[in-house]
């Protein structure tokens, strides 16, 4: 089993920044890719960014150039730096860990609200 705990959500003004963090514990050796997804009411959860154990990143088009995902394998953490936030970024953000067997683990989610 893997446990993922997010932190760092909250309220930001348009154009502002927030940083999300996710700490993994448990059978972390099995985790290959880690990432962030987000979900708004009535919509499917969507990919925001992912990062492999080796550091290869992938971003949704909507966040490219504004968000940066990073990972510390020694600390078992993955962060998401979010800049130039806009109201469309408002969502519950979930940390994800995927094993080499494609088993998914999820955090409890953290709310990000972008509003003036």
Image (cartoon, rainbow, N blue to C red):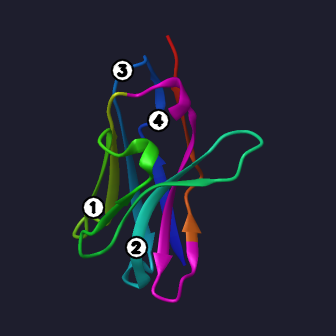
Please give left or right for residue 36 compared with residue 52 in the image.
right
Residue density around tag 3, few if under 14, some if 14–19, many if 20 or more, within 10 Å: some
Mark 4–mark 3 Cα distance, whole angstroms, equals 16 Å
Residue density around tag 1, few if under 14, some if 14–19, many if 20 or more, within 10 Å: many
Q: Are marks 2 and 4 in contact (CB under 8 Å)?
A: no
Give the residue at the far right of this rendering: 42
Q: Which residues are magenta?
A: 85-104
Q: Where residue 102 sits: x, y (%)?
A: 54, 83
Q: Which mark is residue 71?
A: 1
| Sooner in the amino-acid sequence: mark 3 or mark 2 | 3
Mark 2–mark 1 Cα distance, whole angstroms, equals 10 Å
Give the residue at the far bottom of this rendering: 101
Residue at disc 4, secondary structure:
loop
For the point 51% across and 66% down, the residue is 3
Q: Are marks 4 and 3 in contact (CB under 8 Å)?
A: no
For the point 51% across and 34% down, the residue is 89
Q: Which mark is residue 9?
A: 4
Residue at disc 2, secondary structure:
strand
For the point 42% across and 18% down, the residue is 14
Q: Nearer the viewer, mark 3 or mark 2?
A: 3
| Sooner in the amino-acid sequence: mark 3 or mark 1 | 3
Q: Are marks 2 and 1 in contact (CB under 8 Å)?
A: no
Give the residue at the far top of this rendering: 116
Label 3 belongs to which residue? 15
Mark 3–mark 1 Cα distance, whole angstroms, equals 24 Å
For the point 47% across and 69% down, the residue is 97
Q: Where residue 84 sits: x, y (%)?
A: 34, 28
């Amino acid at each position: 089993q893997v446990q993922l705990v997010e932190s760092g959500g909250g309220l930001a003004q348009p154009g502002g920044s927030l940083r999300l963090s996710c700490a993994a514990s448990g059978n972390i050796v099995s985790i290959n890719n880690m990432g962030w997804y987000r979900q708004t009411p009535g919509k499917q959860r969507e990919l925001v960014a992912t990062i492999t154990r080796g550091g290869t990143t992938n971003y949704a088009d909507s966040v490219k150039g504004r968000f940066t995902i990073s990972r510390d394998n020694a600390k078992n953490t993955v962060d998401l730096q979010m800049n130039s936030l806009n109201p469309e970024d408002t969502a519950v953000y979930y940390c994800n860990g995927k094993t080499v067997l494609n088993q998914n683990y999820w955090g409890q989610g953290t709310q990000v609200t972008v509003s003036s």
